[in-house]
Image (tube, rainbow, N blue to C red):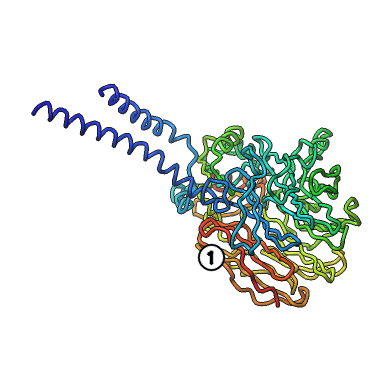
Protein backbone atom coordinates (compact mmCIF):
# COMPACT_ATOMS: atom_id res chain seq x y z
CA UNK A 1 0.00 0.00 0.00
CA UNK A 2 2.74 2.41 1.04
CA UNK A 3 4.56 1.69 -2.19
CA UNK A 4 1.41 2.46 -4.17
CA UNK A 5 0.88 5.67 -2.22
CA UNK A 6 4.44 6.77 -2.85
CA UNK A 7 4.10 5.91 -6.49
CA UNK A 8 0.94 7.99 -6.59
CA UNK A 9 2.63 10.94 -4.93
CA UNK A 10 5.56 10.57 -7.32
CA UNK A 11 3.16 10.52 -10.29
CA UNK A 12 1.41 13.66 -9.10
CA UNK A 13 4.78 15.30 -8.62
CA UNK A 14 5.86 14.27 -12.09
CA UNK A 15 2.69 15.59 -13.67
CA UNK A 16 2.88 18.89 -11.90
CA UNK A 17 6.59 19.37 -12.52
CA UNK A 18 6.24 18.38 -16.17
CA UNK A 19 3.41 20.85 -16.62
CA UNK A 20 5.36 23.58 -14.86
CA UNK A 21 8.64 23.02 -16.66
CA UNK A 22 7.13 22.76 -20.14
CA UNK A 23 4.68 25.60 -19.80
CA UNK A 24 7.00 28.42 -20.91
CA UNK A 25 7.99 26.54 -24.09
CA UNK A 26 4.57 25.41 -25.18
CA UNK A 27 2.64 26.81 -28.07
CA UNK A 28 -0.26 28.79 -26.72
CA UNK A 29 -3.68 27.57 -27.83
CA UNK A 30 -5.40 30.36 -29.75
CA UNK A 31 -9.11 30.15 -28.99
CA UNK A 32 -12.08 32.49 -28.70
CA UNK A 33 -10.98 35.61 -26.88
CA UNK A 34 -7.27 35.02 -27.40
CA UNK A 35 -6.99 37.93 -29.81
CA UNK A 36 -8.16 40.32 -27.11
CA UNK A 37 -5.66 38.70 -24.73
CA UNK A 38 -2.88 39.40 -27.21
CA UNK A 39 -3.98 43.01 -27.63
CA UNK A 40 -4.30 43.55 -23.88
CA UNK A 41 -1.00 41.98 -22.95
CA UNK A 42 0.94 44.06 -25.47
CA UNK A 43 -0.95 47.31 -25.05
CA UNK A 44 1.38 50.28 -25.20
CA UNK A 45 4.21 48.29 -26.77
CA UNK A 46 4.97 48.15 -30.49
CA UNK A 47 4.02 44.63 -31.51
CA UNK A 48 4.40 42.62 -34.68
CA UNK A 49 1.83 39.82 -35.00
CA UNK A 50 2.55 37.33 -37.75
CA UNK A 51 0.03 34.79 -39.06
CA UNK A 52 1.44 31.81 -40.90
CA UNK A 53 0.96 28.10 -41.53
CA UNK A 54 3.11 25.00 -41.92
CA UNK A 55 1.93 24.19 -45.47
CA UNK A 56 2.21 27.75 -46.80
CA UNK A 57 5.09 28.14 -49.26
CA UNK A 58 5.54 31.92 -48.96
CA UNK A 59 5.49 31.51 -45.15
CA UNK A 60 8.49 29.19 -45.29
CA UNK A 61 10.44 31.91 -47.06
CA UNK A 62 9.37 34.74 -44.79
CA UNK A 63 9.66 33.06 -41.39
CA UNK A 64 13.49 33.10 -41.13
CA UNK A 65 13.50 36.75 -42.17
CA UNK A 66 11.16 37.50 -39.29
CA UNK A 67 13.42 35.51 -36.99
CA UNK A 68 16.29 37.79 -37.92
CA UNK A 69 14.06 40.83 -37.55
CA UNK A 70 13.20 39.77 -34.01
CA UNK A 71 16.86 39.29 -33.12
CA UNK A 72 17.74 42.71 -34.48
CA UNK A 73 14.81 44.56 -32.89
CA UNK A 74 14.62 43.76 -29.21
CA UNK A 75 12.29 46.69 -28.65
CA UNK A 76 9.53 45.16 -30.76
CA UNK A 77 7.31 42.44 -29.31
CA UNK A 78 7.01 39.59 -31.81
CA UNK A 79 3.97 37.31 -31.70
CA UNK A 80 3.40 34.46 -34.14
CA UNK A 81 0.05 32.74 -34.68
CA UNK A 82 -0.15 29.55 -36.72
CA UNK A 83 -3.46 30.02 -38.51
CA UNK A 84 -3.79 26.74 -40.37
CA UNK A 85 -7.20 25.26 -40.85
CA UNK A 86 -6.45 22.30 -38.64
CA UNK A 87 -3.97 22.90 -35.85
CA UNK A 88 -2.69 20.24 -33.50
CA UNK A 89 0.63 19.95 -35.28
CA UNK A 90 2.85 21.14 -32.44
CA UNK A 91 5.88 19.19 -33.68
CA UNK A 92 5.92 20.69 -37.16
CA UNK A 93 5.00 24.12 -35.86
CA UNK A 94 7.75 24.13 -33.26
CA UNK A 95 10.31 22.76 -35.71
CA UNK A 96 9.65 25.53 -38.21
CA UNK A 97 9.70 28.22 -35.54
CA UNK A 98 12.97 26.89 -34.15
CA UNK A 99 14.60 26.80 -37.57
CA UNK A 100 13.46 30.35 -38.19
CA UNK A 101 14.83 31.56 -34.85
CA UNK A 102 11.35 32.37 -33.59
CA UNK A 103 10.81 29.79 -30.86
CA UNK A 104 11.62 32.38 -28.20
CA UNK A 105 8.85 34.64 -29.51
CA UNK A 106 5.31 34.48 -28.14
CA UNK A 107 3.90 31.68 -30.23
CA UNK A 108 0.27 30.68 -30.63
CA UNK A 109 -1.51 28.12 -32.73
CA UNK A 110 -5.15 28.06 -33.78
CA UNK A 111 -6.86 25.60 -31.44
CA UNK A 112 -10.49 25.90 -32.40
CA UNK A 113 -11.75 24.05 -35.47
CA UNK A 114 -14.18 26.90 -36.12
CA UNK A 115 -11.48 28.99 -37.76
CA UNK A 116 -13.96 31.36 -39.38
CA UNK A 117 -14.88 32.59 -35.92
CA UNK A 118 -11.26 32.98 -34.84
CA UNK A 119 -10.47 34.95 -37.97
CA UNK A 120 -13.60 37.03 -37.56
CA UNK A 121 -12.46 38.14 -34.11
CA UNK A 122 -9.15 39.30 -35.56
CA UNK A 123 -10.48 40.86 -38.78
CA UNK A 124 -14.00 40.18 -40.09
CA UNK A 125 -12.78 40.62 -43.66
CA UNK A 126 -9.91 38.14 -43.39
CA UNK A 127 -10.64 35.01 -45.38
CA UNK A 128 -7.62 33.01 -44.29
CA UNK A 129 -4.86 33.95 -46.71
CA UNK A 130 -1.43 33.57 -45.12
CA UNK A 131 1.15 34.92 -44.46
CA UNK A 132 -0.31 38.05 -42.94
CA UNK A 133 1.22 40.51 -40.52
CA UNK A 134 -0.42 43.04 -38.24
CA UNK A 135 1.75 45.86 -36.92
CA UNK A 136 0.38 47.33 -33.70
CA UNK A 137 1.79 50.70 -32.73
CA UNK A 138 2.21 52.00 -29.22
CA UNK A 139 -1.03 53.92 -29.58
CA UNK A 140 -2.89 50.80 -30.72
CA UNK A 141 -3.00 51.70 -34.39
CA UNK A 142 -3.07 48.51 -36.44
CA UNK A 143 -1.58 48.16 -39.91
CA UNK A 144 -2.26 44.95 -41.80
CA UNK A 145 0.21 43.62 -44.35
CA UNK A 146 -1.34 40.98 -46.59
CA UNK A 147 1.08 38.42 -47.94
CA UNK A 148 4.81 38.41 -47.32
CA UNK A 149 6.04 41.58 -45.67
CA UNK A 150 8.89 43.61 -47.07
CA UNK A 151 11.61 43.70 -44.44
CA UNK A 152 12.37 47.30 -45.38
CA UNK A 153 8.79 48.18 -44.52
CA UNK A 154 9.12 46.47 -41.15
CA UNK A 155 12.42 48.26 -40.50
CA UNK A 156 10.82 51.60 -41.27
CA UNK A 157 7.88 50.92 -38.98
CA UNK A 158 10.18 49.69 -36.24
CA UNK A 159 12.37 52.79 -36.47
CA UNK A 160 9.28 54.98 -36.20
CA UNK A 161 7.99 53.08 -33.18
CA UNK A 162 11.27 53.04 -31.32
CA UNK A 163 11.78 56.73 -32.01
CA UNK A 164 8.50 57.57 -30.28
CA UNK A 165 9.06 58.29 -26.62
CA UNK A 166 6.45 56.98 -24.25
CA UNK B 1 -10.72 1.03 17.27
CA UNK B 2 -7.34 2.51 16.59
CA UNK B 3 -6.73 -0.07 13.96
CA UNK B 4 -10.05 0.76 12.36
CA UNK B 5 -9.26 4.43 12.54
CA UNK B 6 -5.90 3.86 10.99
CA UNK B 7 -7.44 1.76 8.30
CA UNK B 8 -10.05 4.39 7.84
CA UNK B 9 -7.42 7.08 7.60
CA UNK B 10 -5.40 5.04 5.15
CA UNK B 11 -8.48 4.43 3.10
CA UNK B 12 -9.24 8.12 3.13
CA UNK B 13 -5.65 8.95 2.34
CA UNK B 14 -5.72 6.53 -0.57
CA UNK B 15 -8.99 7.93 -1.78
CA UNK B 16 -7.60 11.39 -1.36
CA UNK B 17 -4.44 10.58 -3.24
CA UNK B 18 -6.27 8.78 -5.99
CA UNK B 19 -8.55 11.76 -6.15
CA UNK B 20 -5.53 14.02 -6.36
CA UNK B 21 -4.02 11.85 -9.09
CA UNK B 22 -7.30 11.80 -10.94
CA UNK B 23 -7.59 15.54 -10.53
CA UNK B 24 -4.01 16.05 -11.68
CA UNK B 25 -4.66 13.80 -14.66
CA UNK B 26 -7.86 15.66 -15.37
CA UNK B 27 -5.92 18.90 -15.37
CA UNK B 28 -3.78 17.61 -18.18
CA UNK B 29 -6.22 15.30 -19.94
CA UNK B 30 -9.36 17.39 -19.84
CA UNK B 31 -7.93 20.41 -21.62
CA UNK B 32 -6.32 18.07 -24.12
CA UNK B 33 -9.66 16.39 -24.77
CA UNK B 34 -11.51 19.66 -24.90
CA UNK B 35 -8.79 21.10 -27.04
CA UNK B 36 -9.10 18.17 -29.40
CA UNK B 37 -12.86 18.52 -29.71
CA UNK B 38 -12.63 22.21 -30.36
CA UNK B 39 -9.44 22.09 -32.38
CA UNK B 40 -10.66 19.54 -34.86
CA UNK B 41 -12.78 20.28 -37.88
CA UNK B 42 -14.45 16.92 -37.35
CA UNK B 43 -17.05 15.95 -34.80
CA UNK B 44 -15.32 12.65 -34.02
CA UNK B 45 -12.28 10.56 -34.88
CA UNK B 46 -13.69 7.53 -36.66
CA UNK B 47 -13.90 6.98 -40.39
CA UNK B 48 -17.70 7.17 -40.51
CA UNK B 49 -19.55 9.89 -42.42
CA UNK B 50 -20.57 11.68 -39.21
CA UNK B 51 -16.87 12.29 -38.48
CA UNK B 52 -16.03 13.63 -41.94
CA UNK B 53 -14.39 16.99 -42.47
CA UNK B 54 -14.80 16.97 -46.27
CA UNK B 55 -17.51 15.21 -48.26
CA UNK B 56 -17.70 15.12 -52.06
CA UNK B 57 -20.87 13.96 -53.85
CA UNK B 58 -21.59 12.78 -57.36
CA UNK B 59 -24.54 11.17 -59.07
CA UNK B 60 -23.89 8.14 -61.25
CA UNK B 61 -25.68 7.99 -64.60
CA UNK B 62 -28.13 5.48 -63.05
CA UNK B 63 -29.19 8.03 -60.43
CA UNK B 64 -27.24 6.55 -57.53
CA UNK B 65 -25.75 9.15 -55.21
CA UNK B 66 -22.12 8.45 -54.33
CA UNK B 67 -20.14 10.13 -51.57
CA UNK B 68 -16.41 10.14 -50.96
CA UNK B 69 -15.26 11.58 -47.64
CA UNK B 70 -12.24 12.20 -45.45
CA UNK B 71 -12.56 11.04 -41.86
CA UNK B 72 -10.35 9.36 -39.30
CA UNK B 73 -7.34 9.31 -41.60
CA UNK B 74 -9.25 7.44 -44.28
CA UNK B 75 -11.05 8.10 -47.52
CA UNK B 76 -14.34 6.22 -47.55
CA UNK B 77 -17.03 5.73 -50.16
CA UNK B 78 -20.72 4.91 -49.84
CA UNK B 79 -23.77 5.15 -52.07
CA UNK B 80 -27.43 5.91 -51.70
CA UNK B 81 -30.31 4.70 -53.84
CA UNK B 82 -32.83 6.93 -52.10
CA UNK B 83 -31.38 10.39 -52.55
CA UNK B 84 -29.29 10.38 -49.41
CA UNK B 85 -31.84 9.11 -46.88
CA UNK B 86 -29.85 5.93 -46.35
CA UNK B 87 -26.37 4.82 -47.42
CA UNK B 88 -24.61 1.57 -48.15
CA UNK B 89 -22.01 0.28 -45.70
CA UNK B 90 -18.97 2.53 -46.24
CA UNK B 91 -15.89 1.08 -47.88
CA UNK B 92 -12.45 2.44 -47.04
CA UNK B 93 -10.26 2.80 -50.11
CA UNK B 94 -7.10 1.74 -48.27
CA UNK B 95 -6.20 -0.30 -45.23
CA UNK B 96 -3.44 1.97 -44.00
CA UNK B 97 -3.93 5.24 -42.16
CA UNK B 98 -3.48 8.12 -44.61
CA UNK B 99 -1.77 11.44 -43.90
CA UNK B 100 -4.45 13.26 -45.85
CA UNK B 101 -4.00 16.77 -47.16
CA UNK B 102 -6.11 18.82 -44.77
CA UNK B 103 -5.73 22.15 -46.56
CA UNK B 104 -8.92 24.20 -46.84
CA UNK B 105 -9.30 23.46 -50.54
CA UNK B 106 -8.37 19.76 -50.39
CA UNK B 107 -11.04 17.06 -50.71
CA UNK B 108 -11.42 13.63 -52.32
CA UNK B 109 -12.62 13.61 -55.93
CA UNK B 110 -14.96 10.99 -57.33
CA UNK B 111 -16.46 10.25 -60.73
CA UNK B 112 -18.66 7.31 -61.70
CA UNK B 113 -19.10 6.21 -65.31
CA UNK B 114 -21.97 4.50 -67.11
CA UNK B 115 -20.63 1.06 -66.30
CA UNK B 116 -20.51 1.88 -62.60
CA UNK B 117 -16.74 2.13 -62.57
CA UNK B 118 -15.63 4.53 -59.82
CA UNK B 119 -12.49 6.65 -60.16
CA UNK B 120 -11.11 8.40 -57.09
CA UNK B 121 -8.27 10.81 -56.47
CA UNK B 122 -7.09 12.66 -53.38
CA UNK B 123 -3.94 14.18 -51.92
CA UNK B 124 -1.77 13.12 -49.02
CA UNK B 125 1.24 14.75 -47.44
CA UNK B 126 4.20 12.65 -48.50
CA UNK B 127 6.74 14.03 -45.99
CA UNK B 128 7.28 16.24 -42.98
CA UNK B 129 7.71 19.29 -45.21
CA UNK B 130 4.07 18.91 -46.31
CA UNK B 131 4.92 18.12 -49.90
CA UNK B 132 1.86 16.55 -51.46
CA UNK B 133 1.17 13.46 -53.50
CA UNK B 134 -1.95 12.81 -55.56
CA UNK B 135 -3.13 9.22 -55.15
CA UNK B 136 -5.68 7.49 -57.37
CA UNK B 137 -7.69 4.33 -57.26
CA UNK B 138 -10.72 2.80 -58.91
CA UNK B 139 -13.44 0.28 -58.24
CA UNK B 140 -14.86 -2.01 -60.88
CA UNK B 141 -17.20 -3.93 -58.59
CA UNK B 142 -19.65 -1.20 -57.68
CA UNK B 143 -17.63 0.21 -54.81
CA UNK B 144 -17.21 -3.07 -52.93
CA UNK B 145 -13.43 -2.87 -53.24
CA UNK B 146 -10.80 -0.51 -54.60
CA UNK B 147 -7.53 -1.08 -56.39
CA UNK B 148 -4.30 -0.43 -54.58
CA UNK B 149 -3.56 3.28 -54.34
CA UNK B 150 -1.31 4.60 -57.10
CA UNK B 151 0.37 7.99 -57.49
CA UNK B 152 -1.04 9.89 -60.43
CA UNK B 153 2.50 10.64 -61.57
CA UNK B 154 5.92 9.16 -60.93
CA UNK B 155 7.37 12.57 -60.05
CA UNK B 156 8.44 12.83 -56.42
CA UNK B 157 7.92 16.56 -56.20
CA UNK B 158 4.85 18.04 -54.54
CA UNK B 159 1.44 17.56 -56.15
CA UNK B 160 -1.84 18.79 -54.65
CA UNK B 161 -5.25 20.21 -55.59
CA UNK B 162 -6.27 17.58 -58.11
CA UNK B 163 -9.49 17.79 -60.10
CA UNK B 164 -11.23 14.89 -61.85
CA UNK B 165 -13.73 15.03 -64.69
CA UNK B 166 -15.55 12.31 -66.58
CA UNK B 167 -15.45 12.82 -70.34
CA UNK B 168 -18.28 11.76 -72.63
CA UNK B 169 -16.36 8.71 -73.87
CA UNK B 170 -15.85 7.45 -70.33
CA UNK B 171 -12.24 8.53 -70.03
CA UNK B 172 -11.16 10.37 -66.91
CA UNK B 173 -9.42 13.73 -67.18
CA UNK B 174 -7.26 14.87 -64.28
CA UNK B 175 -5.55 18.18 -63.58
CA UNK B 176 -3.51 19.20 -60.54
CA UNK B 177 -0.93 21.65 -59.24
CA UNK B 178 2.61 20.31 -59.39
CA UNK B 179 5.89 21.73 -58.07
CA UNK B 180 8.27 19.65 -60.22
CA UNK B 181 9.52 22.63 -62.22
CA UNK B 182 10.82 24.28 -59.07
CA UNK B 183 13.85 21.98 -58.97
CA UNK B 184 15.41 22.71 -62.39
CA UNK B 185 14.66 26.42 -61.99
CA UNK B 186 16.40 26.62 -58.64
CA UNK B 187 19.30 24.50 -59.88
CA UNK B 188 19.89 27.04 -62.61
CA UNK B 189 19.72 29.85 -60.08
CA UNK B 190 16.32 31.11 -61.14
CA UNK B 191 13.49 32.03 -58.83
CA UNK B 192 10.44 29.83 -59.27
CA UNK B 193 7.04 31.09 -58.22
CA UNK B 194 4.01 28.96 -57.52
CA UNK B 195 3.41 25.64 -59.25
CA UNK B 196 2.60 24.15 -62.64
CA UNK B 197 -0.87 23.17 -63.81
CA UNK B 198 -0.38 19.60 -64.96
CA UNK B 199 -2.85 17.17 -66.52
CA UNK B 200 -3.27 13.54 -67.57
CA UNK B 201 -6.03 11.22 -68.78
CA UNK B 202 -7.12 7.69 -67.98
CA UNK B 203 -8.66 5.40 -70.56
CA UNK B 204 -9.21 2.56 -68.08
CA UNK B 205 -11.57 4.13 -65.60
CA UNK B 206 -8.89 5.65 -63.42
CA UNK B 207 -6.62 2.61 -63.04
CA UNK B 208 -3.72 4.22 -64.88
CA UNK B 209 -3.08 7.73 -66.16
CA UNK B 210 -1.13 9.01 -69.13
CA UNK B 211 2.17 10.77 -68.63
CA UNK B 212 1.75 14.09 -66.86
CA UNK B 213 2.02 17.17 -69.04
CA UNK B 214 2.18 20.86 -68.36
CA UNK B 215 -0.68 23.17 -69.27
CA UNK B 216 0.53 26.34 -67.57
CA UNK B 217 3.50 27.14 -65.38
CA UNK B 218 3.84 29.46 -62.38
CA UNK B 219 0.26 29.27 -61.22
CA UNK B 220 -0.78 29.92 -57.65
CA UNK B 221 0.05 26.81 -55.65
CA UNK B 222 -2.60 26.60 -52.97
CA UNK B 223 -6.11 26.90 -54.42
CA UNK B 224 -8.53 24.33 -55.76
CA UNK B 225 -9.11 24.10 -59.51
CA UNK B 226 -12.41 24.39 -61.35
CA UNK B 227 -13.00 21.78 -64.07
CA UNK B 228 -15.80 21.28 -66.58
CA UNK B 229 -16.24 20.17 -70.19
CA UNK B 230 -17.08 22.60 -72.99
CA UNK B 231 -17.88 19.62 -75.22
CA UNK B 232 -16.83 15.97 -75.41
CA UNK B 233 -13.04 15.87 -75.41
CA UNK B 234 -12.70 19.53 -74.45
CA UNK B 235 -11.93 19.93 -70.77
CA UNK B 236 -11.72 23.45 -69.39
CA UNK B 237 -9.79 24.36 -66.25
CA UNK B 238 -10.05 27.59 -64.30
CA UNK B 239 -7.34 28.35 -61.79
CA UNK B 240 -5.71 31.11 -59.78
CA UNK B 241 -2.73 32.14 -61.84
CA UNK B 242 0.29 34.28 -61.05
CA UNK B 243 0.37 37.07 -63.60
CA UNK B 244 3.22 39.55 -64.04
CA UNK B 245 4.14 41.33 -60.85
CA UNK B 246 2.91 38.53 -58.60
CA UNK B 247 -0.76 39.23 -59.32
CA UNK B 248 -2.85 36.20 -58.31
CA UNK B 249 -5.87 36.62 -60.55
CA UNK B 250 -7.82 33.91 -62.30
CA UNK B 251 -7.12 32.32 -65.66
CA UNK B 252 -8.80 29.70 -67.79
CA UNK B 253 -7.57 27.20 -70.33
CA UNK B 254 -9.69 25.28 -72.85
CA UNK B 255 -8.23 22.05 -74.21
CA UNK B 256 -8.41 21.38 -77.94
CA UNK B 257 -8.44 17.72 -76.93
CA UNK B 258 -7.57 16.00 -73.63
CA UNK B 259 -3.87 16.08 -74.56
CA UNK B 260 -3.67 19.60 -75.99
CA UNK B 261 -4.10 22.60 -73.73
CA UNK B 262 -5.07 25.85 -75.37
CA UNK B 263 -4.07 29.39 -74.63
CA UNK B 264 -4.19 30.64 -71.05
CA UNK B 265 -6.73 33.45 -70.86
CA UNK B 266 -7.49 35.87 -68.08
CA UNK B 267 -10.90 35.75 -66.41
CA UNK B 268 -10.70 39.19 -64.81
CA UNK B 269 -8.26 41.89 -63.82
CA UNK B 270 -8.75 42.04 -60.07
CA UNK B 271 -5.14 43.06 -59.51
CA UNK B 272 -4.58 41.00 -56.36
CA UNK B 273 -0.85 41.34 -55.96
CA UNK B 274 0.07 39.15 -53.04
CA UNK B 275 2.79 36.68 -52.08
CA UNK B 276 0.52 34.44 -50.07
CA UNK B 277 -1.61 31.34 -50.14
CA UNK B 278 -5.22 32.47 -50.50
CA UNK B 279 -6.49 28.88 -49.92
CA UNK B 280 -9.59 29.90 -51.84
CA UNK B 281 -10.02 28.53 -55.34
CA UNK B 282 -12.59 29.20 -58.09
CA UNK B 283 -15.53 27.25 -59.46
CA UNK B 284 -16.49 26.64 -63.09
CA UNK B 285 -19.62 25.42 -64.85
CA UNK B 286 -20.41 25.25 -68.54
CA UNK B 287 -24.05 25.32 -69.53
CA UNK B 288 -25.64 23.53 -72.47
CA UNK B 289 -25.36 26.72 -74.52
CA UNK B 290 -21.56 26.53 -74.19
CA UNK B 291 -21.41 29.56 -71.91
CA UNK B 292 -18.62 29.47 -69.36
CA UNK B 293 -19.67 30.50 -65.84
CA UNK B 294 -16.95 31.29 -63.32
CA UNK B 295 -17.18 32.37 -59.71
CA UNK B 296 -14.20 33.25 -57.53
CA UNK B 297 -12.77 35.12 -54.57
CA UNK B 298 -10.34 38.02 -54.77
CA UNK B 299 -8.98 40.70 -52.53
CA UNK B 300 -7.53 42.76 -55.37
CA UNK B 301 -7.14 46.48 -55.83
CA UNK B 302 -9.85 46.48 -58.50
CA UNK B 303 -12.40 44.52 -56.48
CA UNK B 304 -12.72 42.56 -53.26
CA UNK B 305 -15.04 39.71 -52.40
CA UNK B 306 -16.82 36.99 -54.38
CA UNK B 307 -17.57 37.54 -58.04
CA UNK B 308 -19.27 35.93 -61.00
CA UNK B 309 -18.60 36.39 -64.70
CA UNK B 310 -19.57 34.56 -67.90
CA UNK B 311 -17.99 34.02 -71.28
CA UNK B 312 -19.74 33.19 -74.53
CA UNK B 313 -16.56 32.86 -76.58
CA UNK B 314 -14.78 29.99 -74.86
CA UNK B 315 -13.06 32.20 -72.32
CA UNK B 316 -11.60 34.76 -74.73
CA UNK B 317 -13.59 37.50 -73.06
CA UNK B 318 -15.65 37.62 -69.90
CA UNK B 319 -18.52 39.80 -68.77
CA UNK B 320 -17.91 42.45 -66.14
CA UNK B 321 -17.68 40.67 -62.79
CA UNK B 322 -20.73 41.02 -60.59
CA UNK B 323 -20.39 40.77 -56.79
CA UNK B 324 -21.83 37.74 -55.03
CA UNK B 325 -23.11 37.85 -51.46
CA UNK B 326 -23.18 40.46 -48.75
CA UNK B 327 -19.87 42.22 -48.39
CA UNK B 328 -20.52 42.73 -44.66
CA UNK B 329 -21.05 39.00 -44.13
CA UNK B 330 -17.69 37.77 -45.35
CA UNK B 331 -18.92 35.71 -48.33
CA UNK B 332 -16.67 32.73 -49.09
CA UNK B 333 -16.39 29.41 -50.95
CA UNK B 334 -18.51 29.97 -54.04
CA UNK B 335 -19.64 26.98 -56.08
CA UNK B 336 -21.53 27.08 -59.37
CA UNK B 337 -23.49 24.41 -61.21
CA UNK B 338 -25.25 24.29 -64.57
CA UNK B 339 -28.39 22.37 -63.58
CA UNK B 340 -31.21 20.93 -65.62
CA UNK B 341 -33.27 24.11 -65.35
CA UNK B 342 -30.70 26.83 -64.94
CA UNK B 343 -27.63 28.07 -63.15
CA UNK B 344 -27.16 27.92 -59.39
CA UNK B 345 -24.49 29.48 -57.20
CA UNK B 346 -24.03 28.76 -53.49
CA UNK B 347 -21.60 30.32 -51.04
CA UNK B 348 -21.08 30.74 -47.32
CA UNK B 349 -21.62 33.86 -45.24
CA UNK B 350 -20.61 34.34 -41.62
CA UNK B 351 -22.00 36.84 -39.11
CA UNK B 352 -19.54 36.18 -36.30
CA UNK B 353 -21.50 33.26 -34.82
CA UNK B 354 -23.45 31.53 -37.54
CA UNK B 355 -22.52 30.33 -41.02
CA UNK B 356 -25.24 30.30 -43.65
CA UNK B 357 -25.25 28.82 -47.12
CA UNK B 358 -26.76 31.28 -49.54
CA UNK B 359 -28.03 30.60 -52.99
CA UNK B 360 -28.95 32.47 -56.13
CA UNK B 361 -30.25 31.16 -59.42
CA UNK B 362 -30.41 32.26 -63.03
CA UNK B 363 -32.90 31.16 -65.67
CA UNK B 364 -31.27 33.11 -68.50
CA UNK B 365 -27.82 31.53 -68.60
CA UNK B 366 -26.28 33.91 -66.10
CA UNK B 367 -27.49 37.21 -67.55
CA UNK B 368 -29.57 37.95 -64.46
CA UNK B 369 -29.74 36.38 -61.03
CA UNK B 370 -32.36 35.90 -58.35
CA UNK B 371 -32.15 37.63 -55.01
CA UNK B 372 -29.92 35.55 -52.69
CA UNK B 373 -31.65 33.38 -50.11
CA UNK B 374 -30.22 31.46 -47.15
CA UNK B 375 -30.91 27.74 -47.51
CA UNK B 376 -28.90 26.21 -44.64
CA UNK B 377 -27.10 27.28 -41.48
CA UNK B 378 -24.80 25.95 -38.79
CA UNK B 379 -23.08 27.28 -35.67
CA UNK B 380 -19.78 25.45 -35.88
CA UNK B 381 -17.20 24.76 -38.53
CA UNK B 382 -18.28 23.45 -41.92
CA UNK B 383 -17.06 22.13 -45.24
CA UNK B 384 -17.42 24.14 -48.43
CA UNK B 385 -20.96 24.01 -49.82
CA UNK B 386 -21.21 22.01 -53.04
CA UNK B 387 -23.88 21.53 -55.68
CA UNK B 388 -24.69 18.30 -57.46
CA UNK B 389 -27.37 17.30 -59.96
CA UNK B 390 -28.97 13.99 -60.86
CA UNK B 391 -30.08 15.40 -64.21
CA UNK B 392 -33.52 16.33 -62.90
CA UNK B 393 -32.91 18.23 -59.69
CA UNK B 394 -30.13 20.21 -58.08
CA UNK B 395 -28.99 19.44 -54.53
CA UNK B 396 -26.91 21.24 -51.93
CA UNK B 397 -24.29 18.96 -50.41
CA UNK B 398 -22.87 20.29 -47.14
CA UNK B 399 -20.95 18.69 -44.29
CA UNK B 400 -21.09 20.46 -40.95
CA UNK B 401 -19.45 19.54 -37.68
CA UNK B 402 -22.48 20.32 -35.55
CA UNK B 403 -25.27 18.95 -37.73
CA UNK B 404 -23.61 16.25 -39.81
CA UNK B 405 -24.01 15.70 -43.52
CA UNK B 406 -26.96 16.97 -45.49
CA UNK B 407 -28.00 16.71 -49.09
CA UNK B 408 -31.05 18.78 -49.79
CA UNK B 409 -32.94 19.56 -52.98
CA UNK B 410 -32.96 23.23 -53.82
CA UNK B 411 -34.62 25.44 -56.33
CA UNK B 412 -32.56 25.94 -59.45
CA UNK B 413 -34.45 28.56 -61.33
CA UNK B 414 -37.31 26.25 -62.23
Quarter assignment of residue B233: bottom right
What's the residue at 84%, 52% (across, down)?
A: B171
Q: Classify residue B37 as left or right of residue A59.
A: left
What's the residue at 36%, 32% (across, down)?
A: A16
Q: Is residue B25 above or below residue B40?
A: above
* Residue B65 visible in the current orientation: yes
Residue B176 picture location, percent across and down? 77, 48
Q: Classify residue B196 as left or right of residue B29.
A: right
Q: Is residue B304 above or below residue A18?
A: below
Residue B200 picture location, percent across and down? 83, 47
Q: Nearer the viewer, residue B237 or B87?
A: B87
What's the residue at 40%, 34% (across, down)?
A: A19
Quarter assignment of residue B334: bottom right
Q: Quadrant of the N terminus of chain B?
A: top left
Residue B129 picture location, percent across and down? 66, 36
Residue B91 picture location, percent across and down? 64, 47
* Residue A166 visible in the current orientation: no
Which chain letter goes with mark 1? B
Q: Nearer the viewer, residue B329 or B237?
A: B237
Q: Give the labeled residue for mark 1.
A: B351
Q: Nearer the viewer, residue A100 or A32?
A: A32
Q: Classify residue B352 as left or right of residue B323.
A: left
Amino acid sequence: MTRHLLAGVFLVGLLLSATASEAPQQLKPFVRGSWQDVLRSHAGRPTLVHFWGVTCGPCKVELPLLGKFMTDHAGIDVVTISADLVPDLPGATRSMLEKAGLWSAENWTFSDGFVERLRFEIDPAWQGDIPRTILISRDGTMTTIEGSAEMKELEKWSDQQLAVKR
Amino acid sequence: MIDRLNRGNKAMLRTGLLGTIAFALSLTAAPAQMNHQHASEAACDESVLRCASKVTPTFAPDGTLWLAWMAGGQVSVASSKDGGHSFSIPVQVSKEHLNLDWGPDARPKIVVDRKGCIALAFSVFRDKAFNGQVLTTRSTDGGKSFDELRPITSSNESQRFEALGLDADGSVFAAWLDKRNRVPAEQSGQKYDGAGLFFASSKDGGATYSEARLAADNTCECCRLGLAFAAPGHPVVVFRNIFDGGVRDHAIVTFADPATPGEVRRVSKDDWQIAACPHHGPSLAISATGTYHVTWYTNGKARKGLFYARSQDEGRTFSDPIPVGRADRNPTRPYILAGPRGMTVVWKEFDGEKTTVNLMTSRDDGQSWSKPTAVAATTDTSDHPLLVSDGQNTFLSWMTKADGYRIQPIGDGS
